[in-house]
Image: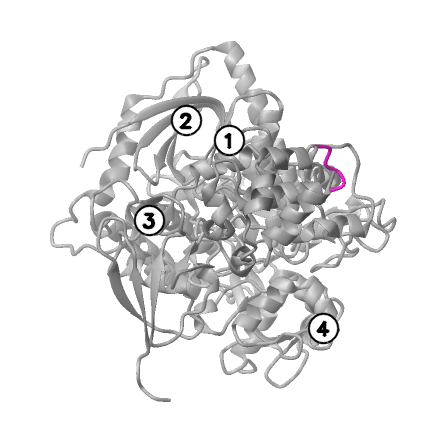
């Protein structure tokens, strides 16, 4: 084995300072999140970032931009002797360093009634269970919203809200008129202005395509 | 630095923690029309429960006429080495079907079989297949439903807030009861005194005490320490579950969970020589023996020199149809592909990883502790799982006991409000003492001490716990661990400091407080592990390698006594 220590370098866009560059030792299998943890345990104890599951790609809180693209920091492998540019998710106000402020976005999400409005009957078949399964895998990491031009142009709609509306539209138990709720949430704006760039699908850790999997579903239900 | 209360807030019921138990508790209290506040260290939906993969155990007789709650109960008691508090295990197993129905009302959809019934599979040590699931991300699916229902009921949740301490107050009869909590907003550093008529503690486990763990960042043993500081009783603290299958390579992924459903689907364990070694340890149940047995078997194989070059063993599903792996184990497939292993054709390399604390606050079947007004559920409580938790029972327990603790807390709060409209006053001296305690990470280190970062101090703690309080224990190592922890606790107070004194976004400040919680809890584990000269459930003593009859159905109950603990040994009623 060659006795050379590989490193990984992160340049982080920070709130109160110029972007700061840090170099940490590389270990095999290390994620971008692991590198952030080394930095905060060493050179930059004041670095603000979120993490919980730490590599299971399931809690959804560590989404940031790496080299411009939204990713789950815990799910992106760092490479030896490579440099990365890190920034908070685009389109959100930043609280501190890599931590974004979700409060207003969560309020808008809640306005979409993102919960089961009981129509009073259970799931009856495997097909009924499967219908919404893909959309139910959403972990609310906000990556889709960060890249969605429609989400940032409107005060009333965002990609995640549309995913939730479609998830309940495909749930046969749900008693609400999800089409009407989607129209209230400017479904028409979405239909008219979504450039179908499919960046939402590219950045979603669960490969949800907001246009195909949500908008088109909501357009066609009655 | 002197810290101050920035704000006060009053609620009938305070729920601490927003995982499976905490959200279920919040929903129950709110559903009864009682004012509730949920406080959570992480964003809503991101609690450790979302990392549960395998499933939830429930006997659905309507789906499988051969199954019933009594079988689930007997499996749970056998799995727990008959150390369970019977009333808790009974509540969990008999009520699980109703709580599963609740979850589906909240929005969850468990995977169905071809007939449209909820599908069930085997997990470890089950007589009938009790485990229901959503792929291999059941915890996330359950959290999503609980979050949705929490939003529907418009329950206030303070996310990214840290509860540093609990307070008691004198009640009308001259006794003490729980009365509030000190809560730090981790973004602003603002401190709120929350007054509550009752509290439900659902703060989760303490996996972060160990260097190799499957646990989330938040699992820093906070709830055990909150309870210990108030003299609340803990039970079974020596019972620490090591999940048999954690990842081992690459090193950065060490400890990461490899779900039990890999074995539930038919996964096989092999040592370096290709020997399916479970034939020597439990030929009847093989890979689906109890987690304690399988973890020890793997550990023993590695210790005997039959492990892989990386110090683990092989787990293989390569004999299964690739479609089954893709449909039933998608997370595992993805996780190992990221590590360069295609589990459809190649074996995984695994080693046990710290996973769950069976011990915790000693509660009755309605969540009550020995401190009036304080209730607990979920991993922070103890007794339901006995000496070893069955895979799938944590999700069942948090739903059943989370609801029950909430019912108790809501009733308690309503009764209190009738007796006395005003909230019980919390003594200023207690508040001042807590404010001084949490300001301590900002003070100068003691004379002649160099400041130590909380990250470094945590690594020291994790090394002690992994090396000396692990899968197989012995007196000499436990005594050494106790000495190490006493030293680390003294060092924590003398020299472990945050590197600056800003209040907003000061991760190191909170890390110092979490470290205190972990050190205090770790000492409770060591105390109980040393006391139990016996091998039973997850607790294995090399110096007492066989079950000792005197310890049969006996539990260790601890409470704080100045700088250490005192204990009683109780005979467990399995009824």
Query: What residue appears at the point 62 percent right and 22 percent down from the top-left corner?
Result: B32
The residue where tag 1 is placed is: B370
* SS assignment for the magenta stretch, majority: loop
Residue under label 2, please give it.
B180
Q: Are marks 3 and 1 on the same chain?
A: yes
- Say which chain tag 2 marks: B
Give the camera-side residue of B231 and A222.
A222
The reply to whether residue B189 is visible in this rendering is yes
Q: Position of residue B148 (x, y in %)?
A: 60, 38
Say if labels 1 and 4 share a chain.
yes
Residue found at x 53% / y 71%: B338
- Depth check, mark 2 against mark 3: the one in front is 3
Give the magenta-colored segment's residue range. Answer: A171-176
Q: Residue furthest bottom?
A: A1
User: Closest to the observer: B140 or B63?
Assistant: B140
Q: Crowding at label 4, few (<14), some or many (≥20) Cα neighbours within 10 Å?
A: few
Query: Judging from the image, what secondary structure is the residue with disc 1 in?
Result: loop
Residue B511 badge: 3
Q: How far is disc 3 from disc 1 in space, using C-alphas?
A: 29 Å
Q: Is residue A199 magenta?
A: no
Q: Residues within 10 Å of mark 1 (few under 14, many from 20)?
A: some
> Which tag is nearer the camera, tag 3 or tag 4?
4
Q: Relative to residue B532, is residue B417 depicted above or below? A: above
Estimate the spatial distance between the alpha carbons at disc 3 and disc 4, rounded to whole Å.
44 Å
Question: N-terminal of the two: label 3 or label 1?
Answer: 1
Q: Is residue B24 left or right of residue B163?
A: right
| Residue where numbered disc 4 is placed | B322
Residue at (47, 74) in percent of width and height: B250
Q: Is residue A120 left or right of residue B413?
A: right
Identify the subunit bearing mark 4: B
In the picture, residue B325 is in which quadrant? Answer: bottom right
């Amino acid at each position: 084995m060659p006795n050379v220590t590989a490193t990984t370098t992160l340049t982080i866009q920070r709130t109160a300072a110029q972007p700061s560059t840090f170099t940490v030792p590389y270990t095999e299998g290390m994620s971008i999140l692991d590198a952030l943890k080394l930095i905060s345990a060493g050179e930059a104890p004041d670095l603000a970032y979120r993490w919980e599951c730490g590599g299971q790609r399931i809690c959804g809180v560590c989404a940031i931009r790496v080299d411009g693209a939204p990713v789950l920091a815990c799910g992106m492998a760092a490479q030896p002797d490579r440099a990365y540019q890190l920034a908070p998710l685009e389109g959100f106000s930043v609280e501190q360093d890599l931590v974004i402020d979700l409060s207003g976005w969560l309020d808008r999400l809640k306005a979409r009634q993102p919960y089961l409005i009981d129509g009073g009957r259970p799931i009856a078949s495997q097909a009924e269970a499967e219908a919404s399964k893909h959309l139910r895998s959403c972990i609310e990491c906000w990556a889709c919203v960060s890249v969605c031009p429609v989400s940032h142009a409107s005060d009333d709609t965002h990609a995640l809200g549309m995913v939730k509306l479609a998830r309940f539209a495909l749930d046969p138990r749900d008693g609400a008129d999800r089409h009407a709720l989607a129209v209230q949430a400017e479904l028409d704006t979405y239909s008219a202005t979504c450039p179908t760039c499919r960046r939402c699908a590219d950045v979603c850790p669960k490969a949800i395509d907001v246009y195909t999997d949500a908008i088109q579903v909501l357009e066609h239900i009655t | 630095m002197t810290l101050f209360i920035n704000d006060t807030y009053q609620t009938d019921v305070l729920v601490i923690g927003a995982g499976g138990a905490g959200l279920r508790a919040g929903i129950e209290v709110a559903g009864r029309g009682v004012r509730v506040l949920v406080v959570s260290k992480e964003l809503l939906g991101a609690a450790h429960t979302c990392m549960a993969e395998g499933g939830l155990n429930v006997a659905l007789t309507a789906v499988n006429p051969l199954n019933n709650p009594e079988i689930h109960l007997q499996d749970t008691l056998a799995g727990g080495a008959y150390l369970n508090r019977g009333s808790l295990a009974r509540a969990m197993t008999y009520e699980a079907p109703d709580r599963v129905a609740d979850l589906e009302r909240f929005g969850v959809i468990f995977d169905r079989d071809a007939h449209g019934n909820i599908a069930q599979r085997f997990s470890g040590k089950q007589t009938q297949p009790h485990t229901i699931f959503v792929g291999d991300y059941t915890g996330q699916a359950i959290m999503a439903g609980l979050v949705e229902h929490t939003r529907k009921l418009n329950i206030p949740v303070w996310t990214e807030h840290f509860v540093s301490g609990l307070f008691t107050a004198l009640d009308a009869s001259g006794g003490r009861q729980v009365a509030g909590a000190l809560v730090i907003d981790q973004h602003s550093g603002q401190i709120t005194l929350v007054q509550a008529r009752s509290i439900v503690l659902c703060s989760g486990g303490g996996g972060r005490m160990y260097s190799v763990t499957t646990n989330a960042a938040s699992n820093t043993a906070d709830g055990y320490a909150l309870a210990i500081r108030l003299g609340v009783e803990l039970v079974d603290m020596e019972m620490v579950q090591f999940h048999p299958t954690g990842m081992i390579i690459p090193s950065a992924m060490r400890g990461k969970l490899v779900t039990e459903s890999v074995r539930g689907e038919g996964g096989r364990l092999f040592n370096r020589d290709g020997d399916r070694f479970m034939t020597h340890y439990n030929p009847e149940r093989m890979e689906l023996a109890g987690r304690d047995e399988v973890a020890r078997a793997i550990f023993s194989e590695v210790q005997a020199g039959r492990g892989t070059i990386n110090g683990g063993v092989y787990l293989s599903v390569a004999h299964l149809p690739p479609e089954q792996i893709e449909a039933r184990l998608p997370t595992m497939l993805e996780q190992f592909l990221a590590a360069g292993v295609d589990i459809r054709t190649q074996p995984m390399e695994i080693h046990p990883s710290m996973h769950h604390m069976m011990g915790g606050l000693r509660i009755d079947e309605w969540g009550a502790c020995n401190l009036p007004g304080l209730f607990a559920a979920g991993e922070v409580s103890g007794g339901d799982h006995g000496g070893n938790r069955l895979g799938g029972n944590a999700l069942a327990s948090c739903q059943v006991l989370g609801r029950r603790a909430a019912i108790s807390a809501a009733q308690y709060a309503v009764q209190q409000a009738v007796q006395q409209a005003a909230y019980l006053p919390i003594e200023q001296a207690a508040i001042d003492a807590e404010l001084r305690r949490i300001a301590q990470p900002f003070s100068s280190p003691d004379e002649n001490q160099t400041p130590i970062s909380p990250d470094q101090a945590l690594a020291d703690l994790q090394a002690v716990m992994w090396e000396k309080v692990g899968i197989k224990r012995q007196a000499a190592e436990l005594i050494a661990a106790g000495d190490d922890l006493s030293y680390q606790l003294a060092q924590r107070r003398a020299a472990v400091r945050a590197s600056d004194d800003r209040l907003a976004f000061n991760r190191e400040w909170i890390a110092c407080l979490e470290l205190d919680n972990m050190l205090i809890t770790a000492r409770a584990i060591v105390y109980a592990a040393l006391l139990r000269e016996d091998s039973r459930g997850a607790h294995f003593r090399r110096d007492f390698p066989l079950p000792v009859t005197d310890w049969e159905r006996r539990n260790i109950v601890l409470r704080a006594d100045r700088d250490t603990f005192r204990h009683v040994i109780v005979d467990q009623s399995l009824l």
